[in-house]
Image: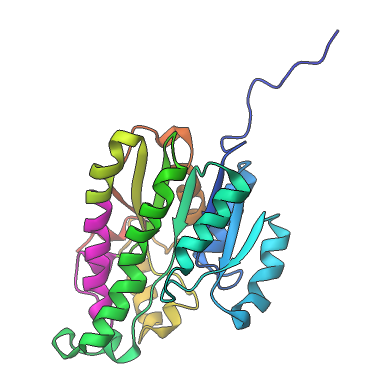
Amino acid sequence: MSSSTPSTALPLAGKKGLVTGIANDKSIAYAVAKAIVELGGEIAITYQNDKTARYTQPLAEALGAKRFLKLDVAEEGCLENVIAECGAAFGEIDFAIHSMAFCNADDLHGRVIDATEAGFDAAMNVSCHSFLRMAKALEPLMAHGGSLITMSYLGAERVVRNYGVMGIIKAALESAVRYMAYDLGPKGIRVFAVSPGPIMTRAASGIANFNNLLESDAQKAPLGRTVTIEEVGALTAFLCTSGSSGMTGQTIYVDGGAHIVA
């Protein structure tokens, strides 16, 4: 009797994409990349500079990344070159994860009206506009549709103490998701923002009194706890699968339900 092909394949088998923003194995982006690989996806991973590469290259190798590429979105043409390299490696791209944010400490912790023009521009460029640029560069490589996913936070919708200008930037990012979903929908390209609850990552360590924020969210969340990077990774990977084919333009919370409680 001849062998037969299994009736069910991994949800992302044969799918290829780009994951940005991994800093270490505690990063949300790392959990996303791991979840995608576990579902059968092939990935390219980026690093910001030689210093961060020391921590991220072993992770990229462990995940079997097909490309490990330097990406500094503040460097002219760098993002576009990275995507061109991914296109050369993969042909078509099925998904991309934008997990990048930056804000000067003074602008993050201070009053928003005191933010400098240069600081505001830098935060907007790295944290929001780079997602638009990513989509534009990827559009020709997503001839059969795909998923574009960025990372947001509740500070986009409500005032979160010590989040400052980044709350404004994340609000712009979530608005961009909706407009991008409208523009790219006819091509089958779906766009999402994932909004995790507070998680102790390297980026979160720059927010003043972050431990208090963790405790507060755990107390008010209907699930009675904060979430893990693995839970965020699982949801994000799902958005790359055909199971989410009827969805686009949403900000999806992964925070134990804390966002519904005042």
**Which residue is farthest left?**
113
State whether the magenta stretch is mostly helix, strand or loop.
helix
Give the residue drawn at x 13%, y 86%.
113
Q: Name the residue at 21% across, 89% down.
A: 116
- 9 lies left or right of 245: right
Residue 177 belongs to magenta span: yes
Any part of residue 157 in sight: yes
From what the image shows, is residue 235 above or below residue 213? above
Residue farthest along the top direction in this orientation? 1
Identify which residue, 147 or 234, lies in the foreground.
147
Q: Position of residue 137 (x, y in %)?
A: 41, 54
- Viewport quadrant of the C terminus: bottom left
Q: x, y percentage for residue 175?
A: 21, 57
Residue 75 image-quadrant placement: bottom left
Q: Name the colour scheme.
A: rainbow
Tell me what residue is drawn at x 25 percent, y 44 percent: 183
For image coordinates 32% across by 58% down, the residue present is 132
Residue 193, magenta (yes or no)? no
Asked if 68 appears above or below 235 in the picture, the reply is below
Above or below: residue 251 compared with residue 160? above
> Which residue ends up furthest to the right in the rendered image?
1
Query: Do we see residue 228 in this rendering?
Result: no
Asked whether 218 or 116 is in front, the reply is 116
Image position, residue 74 (x, y; %): 41, 76
Segment tinted magenta in the rendering: 154-178
- Horizontal placement of 21 versus 128: left or right? right
> Which image quarter is the N terminus in?
top right
Residue 81 x, y percent position in the rendering:
51, 62
Task: Classify residue 140 as left or right of residue 168.
Answer: right
For residue 104, what is the image quadrant?
A: bottom left
Total residue callouts? 0
